[in-house]
Amino acid sequence: MRNHRQADLSRLLLVDDDPLIRLSLAAVLAEIGFSVRSAEDGLSALAEIGREIPDIILSDLNMPRLSGFEFLQVVRRHFPSIHLIAMSGAFSGDEVPSGVTADAFYQKGSGVRCLLKIVERVAHSRPLPVHKETASAPLWILRSAYDASGEPCVSIDCPDCHRTFQQQVGASLSLIREAHCVHCRNTVYYAIVGPVDMAPALPSQRVRRETKSDRQPQL
């Protein structure tokens, strides 16, 4: 049975790089009355917003090209009236994770009913004011390398002074990491796409191939 809601709260943009998740969630949300469009990453989603501004955005966080962290921050800054829901399997609980610009959070795998409750709640609430935008939304690092000592590291472009520095990657279990720019000492929060090998690399191991395992949709 379709739920009745105000027409101005019916347009939803679903953003996820997994086509199975997009297909499954779009079908569920359309069934309860939402007009659903979908995009495969943050850049594609921005193009969709350019065509028509949605009322609600449901976005994954771990995506190529433009991550959900960055995408949601951009949307909050330029389209503060849009209701934002972040989703990920990397965080647990229903609290919005630190560094995520969103009105609500859905943990992937916690069930469709849980998601529908979140969407319904957000659809009938007011979006966060512009001044509450998260200032510390993390950078999404798309590359990794090794420093001169053979330790795994990432190259970070400081958003404050716009200069690049290298940061060693320690054995942290946290998705959101913290670094300090060596040039201006600005605190930078960042996240890394994919697993990082924490073992020091031998010269023959500096270049390695990564394989992507089969992904199962988590609804």
Image (tube, helix red, strand yellow):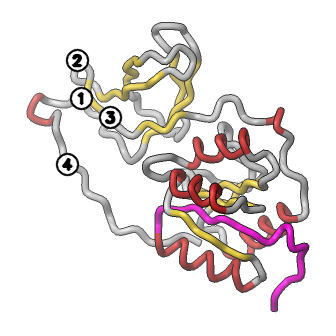
Quarter of the image holding residue 10? bottom right
Query: Tag 2 or tag 3, which sits nearer the N-term?
Result: 3
Per the image, the residue denoted by label 1 is 200
Per the image, the residue denoted by label 3 is 144
Between marks 2 and 4, how big is the CA–CA gap? 21 Å
Asked whether residue 171 is drawn in magenta, I would say: no
Per the image, the residue denoted by label 2 is 149
The residue lying furthest to the bottom in this view is 1
- The residues colored magenta run 1-18
Q: Where is residue 80 in the image (x, y as percent from the top left)?
A: 79, 45
Q: Are marks 4 and 3 in contact (CB under 8 Å)?
A: no
Q: Where is residue 114 in the image (x, y as percent from the top left)?
A: 74, 70
Report the number of numbered marks. Answer: 4
Q: Do the residues labelled 1 and 2 touch (CB within 8 Å)?
A: yes
Taking the spot 44% from the left edge, 39% from the top edge, the residue there is: 192
Per the image, the residue denoted by label 4 is 209
* Label annotation for residue 164: none
Quarter of the image holding residue 164? top left
Q: Position of residue 177 (x, y in %)?
A: 52, 31
Taking the spot 52% from the left edge, 32% from the top edge, the residue there is: 190
Between marks 3 and 2, how big is the CA–CA gap? 15 Å
Residue type, label 2: Ser
Between marks 1 and 3, how big is the CA–CA gap? 13 Å
Task: Check disc 2 and report its element: helix, strand or loop.
Answer: loop
Q: Where is residue 112 in the image (x, y as percent from the top left)?
A: 68, 75
Query: Tag 4 or tag 1, which sits nearer the N-term?
Result: 1
Query: Tag 3 or tag 1, which sits nearer the N-term?
Result: 3
Between marks 1 and 2, how big is the CA–CA gap? 8 Å
